[in-house]
Image (cartoon, rainbow, N blue to C red):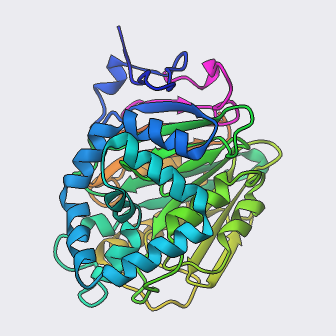
């Protein structure tokens, strides 16, 4: 007996094999569905997205993380919200249209949809004085990334792993999206983890060229109350129309100026012609890029700038995680990355909603729903090189 997790609605159809066996889903804390969408425009894709995920979007927008920001933009955050929205829409009008489609499909206000997608910037502005480390603001202290090369270097294999941390509130509500560009479409196919009502690109995302990225939120003490949202820049760098063919091209897209905030983005090439791993740290108009080399062997990130000289908040959870990683033997295999991301309490936390691990030896991206990769089977296993093929029989779940 199998549990189909794709929904057929408004042209969004299940893909052969994209199912989760009950024996697998039973081992997961969360079982996010994968929604498949084919469209000719991002507005049309957004309408389907909003309709499919309507219940999750409405629940997320009614929750504490979003409603706290609703109150902020009614008062002290009003001008910043208007500027961030205008600057982001002016820079990338096609994603503003996608958000309009999402809001219409989900039957929620467009303002709520924008407030949610600007969450990173608005939270940093809201807590500019008190800081994100105070109280129980764990949703701002999130994500761990680990890259590892096998002892023989890239040619012998490499792994990139990511624990997606947010709040337990969003755990039952997030999902995966697969946008397939129909013939003649004015956008590129794109897939990834989606927070309810958000653009793909904010979290783990991949494109039709076999490029995969993960995002590690950073906490600068100062950000612009204007400029372009992280979610818009990240989405366009990896899934912009006729963009994102290589790791370097994605890194170049992320290196643009005009950010309101900043981020640490890990970019992974998953095909023989794109193989490689790069990391970029950004803040406003600054950036620092490094390509993982055979000499380096590994890299990690835990919500703190490591190369850019940015005045930042460094929360206790960041210090604890990075100290643990630095105390361990350097990871040099897929098994090492799996074991580290499964470390209870420190790395695998109550707020971990997903783990995603790409292994070049198997050429697959394995995905878990908040449980230890070392002791539970993946919820999904996808071949990113064929993910957007039709039918996608060889990118099925277990």
Percent of width and height locating residue 363: 66, 36
Q: Residue sitting at 27 percent across and 55 percent down?
A: 351
Is 286 on the left-hand or right-hand side of 139?
right
* Residue 149 seen: no
| Displayed quadrant of residue 252 | bottom right
Compared with 391, 196 (above or below) is: below
Q: Nearer the viewer, residue 81 or 310?
A: 81
Quadrant where the image shows the N terminus: top left
Q: In the image, 393: left or right of 219?
A: right
Is residue 197 in view? Answer: yes
Instruction: Kindly indicate the quadrant of the structure image that contains residue 255.
Output: bottom right
Q: Residue at x 37, y 33 (%)?
A: 376
Any magenta on residue 265?
Answer: no
- What segment is highlighted magenta in the picture? 376-398
Q: Residue furthest right?
A: 273
Report the magenta stretch's main SS.
loop
Q: Does residue 40 appear left or right of residue 272 in this picture?
A: left
Q: Position of residue 149 (x, y in %)?
A: 66, 54
Q: Magenta span has 379?
A: yes
């Amino acid at each position: 007996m199998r549990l189909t997790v794709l929904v057929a609605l408004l042209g969004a159809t299940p893909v052969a094999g994209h199912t989760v066996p009950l024996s697998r889903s039973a081992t997961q804390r969360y079982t996010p569905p994968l929604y498949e969408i084919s469209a000719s425009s991002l507005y049309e894709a957004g309408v389907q997205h909003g309709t499919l995920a309507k219940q999750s979007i409405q629940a997320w927008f009614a929750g504490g993380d979003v409603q706290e920001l609703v109150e902020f933009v009614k008062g002290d955050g009003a001008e910043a919200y208007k500027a961030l929205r205008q600057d982001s829409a002016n820079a990338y009008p096609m994603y503003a249209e996608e958000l309009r489609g999402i809001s219409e499909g989900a039957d929620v206000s467009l303002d709520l949809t924008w407030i949610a997608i600007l969450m990173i910037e608005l939270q940093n502005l809201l807590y500019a004085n008190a800081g994100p480390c105070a109280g129980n603001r764990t949703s701002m202290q999130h994500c761990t990334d680990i890259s590892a090369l096998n002892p023989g270097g890239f040619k012998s294999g490499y792994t990139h792993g990511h624990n997606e941390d947010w709040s337990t509130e969003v755990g039952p509500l997030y999902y995966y999206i697969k946008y397939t560009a129909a013939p003649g479409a004015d956008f590129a196919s794109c897939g990834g983890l989606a927070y309810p009502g958000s653009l793909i690109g904010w979290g783990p995302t991949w494109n039709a060229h076999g490029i995969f990225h993960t995002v590690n939120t950073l906490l600068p003490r100062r950000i612009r109350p204007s400029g372009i949202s992280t979610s818009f820049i990240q989405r366009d760098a990896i899934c912009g129309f006729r963009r994102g063919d290589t790791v370097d091209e994605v890194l170049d897209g992320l290196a643009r100026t005009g950010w309101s905030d900043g981020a640490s983005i890990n970019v992974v090439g998953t095909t023989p012609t794109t193989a490689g791993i790069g990391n970029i740290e950004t803040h406003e108009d600054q950036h620092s890029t490094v390509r993982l080399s055979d000499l380096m062997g590994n890299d990690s990130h835990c919500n703190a700038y490591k190369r850019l000289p940015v005045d930042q908040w460094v929360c206790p959870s960041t210090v604890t995680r990075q100290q643990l990683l630095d105390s361990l033997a350097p990871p040099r295999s897929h098994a090492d990355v799996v074991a580290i991301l499964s470390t209870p309490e420190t790395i695998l936390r109550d707020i971990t909603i997903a783990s995603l691990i790409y292994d070049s030896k198997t050429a697959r991206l394995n995905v878990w729903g908040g449980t230890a990769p070392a002791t539970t089977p993946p919820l999904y296993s996808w071949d990113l090189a064929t993910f957007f093929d039709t039918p996608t029989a060889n990118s099925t779940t277990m």
